[in-house]
Image (spheres, rainbow, N blue to C red):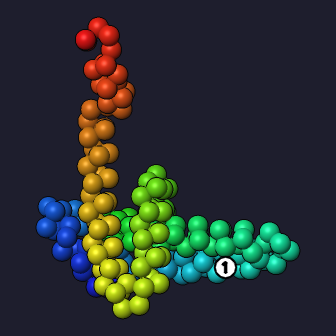
Amino acid sequence: CGYFYGKIATAIEQELGLAKSEMREISMWREMKDAIIDLWWLLISLALALVISLIPLLGAPIALAYSLYFQTLTLGRDQFSFPLSLRGKHRAQRIEFCGQHMPHTMGVGTVVLVMAFIPIVGALFLVTAAAGTVILHRRLLLVAADAAQVGVGEALAEPEAAQSPASL
């Protein structure tokens, strides 16, 4: 599925105006290295959840919460990897972006996790999750560009200035 999601992400990015000159593919070897590192962290996470679940009484709920957190984070990062990989971002850069946009990453991951439990129809919705993540990524870039252009201090001061007693 990842190959086709990548094709969908490329088509959407081109439709949204991303120039071919801005697209930088990551080498197959780099992608394989990143995938092996992700698999390693997944195995470590599962082993940790197993150990935590062995704690009497509290272990199972804590392990469940930890596993849900890790899975939603991983699935969200996986979805954001499509638009970020198109721009040549490596694993560390993708993790940094997702860390800066944690609510969005967790939200996308939660939707993907829920859709994975719905037979047949869920697979169709996962395609829209890949497409939606590309659009969300573009929106986050535009918001960041607007904030940088206006300046964070000016953007925060505008609403307060409009409600000050002197302006009434």
Please provide percent x and percent y for residue 32: 46, 82
Point out the residue furthest to the bottom here.
Answer: 120
Classify mark 1: helix, strand or loop: helix
160 and 46: which one is in front? 160
Residue 100 in view in this figure: yes
Please provide percent x and percent y for residue 43: 64, 81
Point out the residue furthest to the top here.
Answer: 166
Question: Residue at left 19%, top 70%?
Answer: 12
Quadrant for residue 48, please give it: bottom right
Quadrant for residue 83, please give it: bottom left
The residue indicated by pointer 1 is: 46
Vertically, is 60 above or below 97?
below
Quadrant into which the C terminus falls:
top left
Please provide percent x and percent y for residue 113: 47, 76
Residue 21 in view in this figure: no
Quadrant into which the N terminus falls:
bottom left
Position of 119 with respect to 37 (left or right) is: left
- Crowd rating for badge 1 (residues with CA inside 10 Å; few <14, some 14–19, many 20+): some
Vertically, is 136 above or below 11?
above
> What type is the residue that disc 1 sits on?
Leu
Please provide percent x and percent y for residue 135: 26, 63
Quadrant for residue 38, please give it: bottom right
45 and 168: which one is in front? 168
Point out the residue furthest to the right here.
Answer: 56
Count of numbered circles on the image: 1
Question: Residue at left 42%, top 85%?
Answer: 118
Question: Residue at left 30%, top 25%?
Answer: 158
Question: Residue at left 42%, top 71%?
Answer: 111
